[in-house]
Amino acid sequence: MEAGSAAAKAGVRPGDVLMRVNGEAVTDVLAYRHLLSQGKATLEIARPKEAPRAMTGVATTMQDHHRLQLSAPPSLEDTFTFDVEWEDPGLEFEEVLFDGIHLCANKCDFCYVHQMPRGFRKSLYIMDDDYRLSFLYGSFVTLTNLSEGDINRILDENLSPLYVSVHTANQDLRKDMMKWWKLKVKDEQAVQIRGMIERLESIDLYTQIVLVPERNDGENLDDTVDYLSSRPNVISAAVVPIGLTSHRTNLPDVRTFNKEEARDSLRRLNIWRKKFLTERGTRFVFPSDELYLLAGEPLPSEEEYEGFPMLENGVGMIRDFLTEALPELPAALPEPRKVILATGTLFAESLDLAVEPLRAIEGLTLEVRSITNKTFGPATTVAGLLTGRCFRHAIKTAEADLLIVPPTTLRYGTELMLDDVSLGELRQEFRMDVRAGGATLGELARVILDGAQSSGHQWGMSAHAVKDGGHTPLEIEVAERGMRGQA
């Protein structure tokens, strides 16, 4: 609550509930802002007997009241109103969604949630597919769960851009790969990907293709890129190879790419990229770092990522890491120090090459240790999915002075890993200093040399991806889930 705001003057307190604006129930912060944009607004506030922790929005069902920690729906006797005119009321909300997350209608062959082992916090098993989170935070959605009202709202409120998982423009193949549940599909037109892209012609779309060997690669990939590039509202397409874990019980038999298949996909995409750059001034389609590493091909230059618009989708993460050069290095350390840089098996070789100049420093023993994933299985090679358990299997007590873990292993803005093991716990167990590395090579070098936290954010995101301001629990979860595929 902002001090001196209209809400504060009206007597609104933390724990109160926003019921309606101009007589309309408000389902999320976007609807709230939209109603305020009309100029004059009457806000109806309720004060429950047992208040939640912070100001929240109206709950429209009994289930939502339980989620929002209300003992009972507020009655009319508990409410009061206040008016604003062309001003921000000063309300701050615990969450940006007041009616819960819109859930996925699909059972995709490659869904990572279906491959999650047991024992993690409940939020990581939520199959979210909410267009509002796509607009707010850039999370990818399939559009298959949209209702006619959702589509109209996207268009009327100009919720642009959106981030859309297309996978293939072949409708029959998309249905076979995604296997949407008929009972969860609200509008049959929503599952028609070409029709949806064309209906949303006024909305900018950033798209992605999760590539599965012998399914939507090869000529099908060419056809999908050809179609997406023909739509004026499609800004770009990211291509990400399928990610698998060892927990695929009762799931379709799929596999990862081999080197030759990855090279074939890159060859096809590079033909398109050259064509688009010549004709349109943009490469349009952006393969993920993982595809280059699987193919054994060099990463593109920084310029070729065109500002890193798909960074949080694993496109350009390594190149962005390398953009800040190493600082001036000392000839020797005041005292000898052994440092272990732990990372996933996919990135280990690239990291080892990047830090090679530091090995010339007298007194510094530097090892890049490739960590096999003991939680998700060896098929999971990205650093962001390493857990405390993985490090416990790979690191011996007191074998180094400093252990540096990838910042992408940590929950957004914390020192907690996916399995809720903290860096503090690892420090005690390993009897050595344990710290997160930096988002760039330069920051990582400073952590190695100084044994101190690098400047800026320590959340595994580069400056290209960080948003200013505070973060709600929902924002943290969305950001965290989006970062796990990065190398």
Image (cartoon, grey):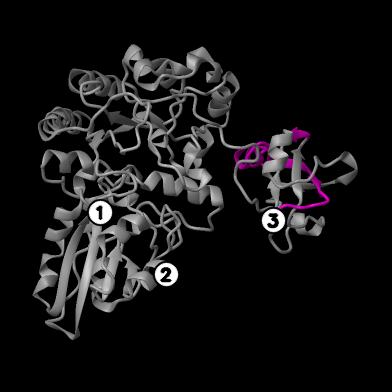
Mark sitting earlier along the chain (3/2): 3
**In which quadrant is the N terminus drawn?**
bottom right
Mark sitting earlier along the chain (2/1): 1
Q: Outermost residue toward the bottom?
A: 334
Q: Which residue is mark 3?
A: 53
Of circles 3 and 2, which is in front? 2
Q: Which x, y percent locates residue 51?
A: 76, 53
Q: Label 2 is placed on what type of residue?
A: Gly
Q: Which residue: 38% across, 29% down? A: 165
Q: Secondary structure at mark 3?
A: loop
Magenta extent: 23-52
| Magenta-colored stretch includes residue 36 | yes
Tell me whether the residue at label 1 lies in contact with that at label 3, contact meaning CB atoms closer than 8 angstroms.
Answer: no
Q: Which residue is mark 1?
A: 320
Tell me whether the residue at label 2 lies in contact with that at label 1, contact meaning CB atoms closer than 8 angstroms.
Answer: no
Q: Which residue is mark 2?
A: 424
Q: Which residue: 25% across, 60% down? A: 394
Q: Secondary structure at mark 1?
A: helix
Q: Label 1 is placed on what type of residue?
A: Asp
Q: Secondary structure at mark 2?
A: helix
Q: Which mark is residue 354?
A: none
Left/right of residue 130 with respect to residue 423 in the rendered view: right
Q: For the residues marked 3 and 2, what is the alpha-carbon distance in whole angstroms? A: 28 Å
Q: Label 3 is placed on what type of residue?
A: Arg
Q: Which residue: 18% across, 62% down? A: 368
